[in-house]
Image: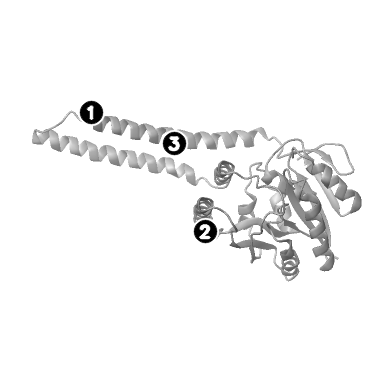
Amino acid sequence: MALLSIIIPSYNEEENISRTAKRLREILTEANISYELLFISDGSRDNTFAEIEKEAKVDSNVKGYEFSRNFGKEAAIFAGLKMAKGNCAVVIDCDLQHPPEMIPEMFKLWKEGYDVVEGVKSDRGDESKLHKLFVGAFYGVMSKLMKINMNDTSDYKLLDRRVIDVLLDLKESNTFFRALSFWAGFKSTNIKYEVQERAAGESKWSFMSLLKYAIMNTTSFTTAPLQVVTFLGILSIAFAVIMGLQTLVRYFMGNAVEGFTTVILLVLMIGGFIMLSLGIIGHYLARIYDEVKGRPRYIIARETGKEEAKHE
């Protein structure tokens, strides 16, 4: 019988561990699906891992891993993919905002021959208008860059073992899991779901953390921001030509003015362009620096039933 691995990144989710494990156990048992639950505690500062250990003691299908510090959700997902032993794997949030009731349908689609089953949001829940606008703009840009519709996509998806192996073979340490499943190709399909209310606790994502996440993922997946530097350079040249022609015309017409205000505005504008361009280039240099160092994506400090640390 095919084994399904459920990967559950968890950061400060002590209130949700037991509830999530119980709900997943009920759904998968009822659907007669062999499974393993992989909880990845991403350097949680509460009792998340202690709760995972409790579940592992009462259910041999539950396994838990704890990072030595917070490495981020991307690292937690890839740690889960590395540890997964299943023929396929589903990534799902610990707060149950991804409805686990969809997993049997995803598994059924996998058995029908699909290598990737993407969870697509039909409704974003009670997110603020600003958040929806920001997310829509981000995925709109990413969709155009990738020439694939990524609107309303999420980390909630099922991957076949072949796809998992492809992703694990990637050498880069800075990854964007949500986009890489598209990049990998393979036969895929979508399944729509409505975002649920959190079962317990509060969201760990602030607007600034989401903004940082978007910037990091954009620069890890595409060089498009570097093209902004070229665009700003062309824009600066265009302004310089226009202002130069205007100055010459006024000079020959005999009504040239000192133009102090114009000079100040041009200096400020061009200076702003230069600083923004240096910032973009510097960000890419920092990413290159991180990749060259070759440090592990994550460090596992503890796992259920064992004490030794692992590095990946």
Label 1 CA crowd tier, 10 Å (few <14, some 14–19, many 20+): few
* Image coords of residue 225 (percent x, y): 48, 44
Horizontal side of 264 relative to 230 (left or right) equals: left
Q: In which quarter of the image is residue 292?
A: top right
What residue is shown at x 71% (from left), y 65% (from top)? Answer: 102
Label 2 CA crowd tier, 10 Å (few <14, some 14–19, many 20+): few
Q: Nearer the viewer, mark 1 or mark 3?
A: 1
Q: Which residue bears the numbered disc 2?
A: 147
Instruction: Pick whichever, 61 or 248, lies toward us.
Output: 61
Dot 1 amino acid type: Phe
What residue is shown at x 89% (from left), y 41% (from top)? Answer: 306
Local SS, label 1: helix
As drawn, 284 above or below 134: above
Q: Are marks 1 and 3 in contact (CB under 8 Å)?
A: no
The reply to whether residue 185 is visible in this rendering is: yes
* Image coords of residue 232 (percent x, y): 38, 41
Separation (CA) of disc 1 from disc 3: 26 Å
Q: Which residue bears the numbered disc 1?
A: 260
The reply to whether residue 85 is visible in this rendering is: no
Name the residue at the bottom extreme. 112
Q: Are marks 2 and 1 in contact (CB under 8 Å)?
A: no
Dot 3 amino acid type: Ser
Q: In which quarter of the image is the C terminus?
A: top right
Instruction: Pick whichever, 97 or 114, lies toward us.
Output: 97
Dot 2 amino acid type: Lys
